Image (cartoon, grey):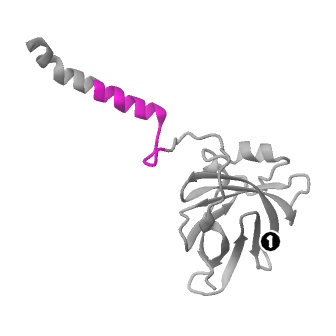
């Protein structure tokens, strides 16, 4: 009996060490998500994401750009004479990374920069009922990261590769009626 008691603290320390090692190997974050997620699973469209999202010029009520996002369509407009762009697409895939972040993949119906690559990724994070951060997926050299197929886009735009394809997160506020 004394042998068991004298080795008890050592056994507890060994068990704690093994548990810490397993958590480090698995790599879970505080939400239970794996930090090494290199795949996308089909998710559901988050209802809070529906609406018109305004990217306001700091200190102004004038939007620099905006998204109109519905359950099956997405439109992006930037009214700038030098950098302006506009595109619209049908939502073909949604992946939820958490309750407030994820990925939307659209198939362009208007405004594709390359008709041979009609699929684009749009990441979102920090989603609430009134604010969100959005980012169009682009290559590190600021060229289009669009893909030729939905399967290619699902494989390319993963959570693990988000930092590769996002150089700037735009803050957006939901337009109120």
* Residue name at image x 85 percent, y 55 percent: 118
Q: Position of residue 146 (x, y in %)?
A: 80, 53
59 and 92: which is toward the camera: 92
The residue carrying mark 1 is: 85
* Residue name at image x 76 percent, y 74 percent: 77
Q: Position of residue 45 (x, y in %)?
A: 66, 59
Q: Which residues are magenta?
A: 15-32
21 and 82: which is toward the camera: 21
In the displayed structure, 113 sits above or below 24; it is below
Q: Position of residue 35 (x, y in %)?
A: 52, 42
Task: Give the SS element for disc 1.
Answer: strand
Which residue reaches farthest left? 2
Q: Position of residue 88 (x, y in %)?
A: 81, 67
Residue 170 visible in the snapshot: no
Q: Is residue 174 magenta?
A: no
Residue 66 visible in the snapshot: yes
* Residue name at image x 77 percent, y 65 percent: 73
């Amino acid at each position: 009996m004394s042998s068991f008691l004298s080795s008890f603290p050592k056994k507890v320390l060994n068990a704690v060490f093994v548990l810490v090692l397993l958590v480090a190997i698995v790599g879970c974050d505080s939400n239970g998500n794996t930090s090494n997620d290199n795949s996308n699973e089909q998710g559901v469209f988050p209802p809070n994401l529906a609406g018109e999202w305004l990217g306001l010029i700091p200190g102004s009520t004038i939007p620099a750009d905006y998204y109109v996002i519905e359950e099956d369509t997405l439109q992006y407009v930037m009214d700038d004479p030098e950098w302006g762009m506009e595109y619209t697409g049908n939502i073909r895939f949604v992946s939820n990374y958490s309750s407030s972040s994820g990925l939307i993949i659209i198939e362009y119906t208007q405004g594709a920069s390359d008709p041979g690559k009609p699929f684009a990724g749009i990441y979102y994070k920090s989603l609430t009922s009134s604010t969100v951060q959005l980012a169009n997926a682009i290559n590190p050299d600021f060229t289009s990261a669009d893909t030729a197929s939905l399967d290619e886009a699902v494989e390319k735009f993963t959570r693990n590769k988000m930092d590769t394809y996002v150089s700037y997160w735009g803050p957006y506020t939901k337009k109120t009626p």
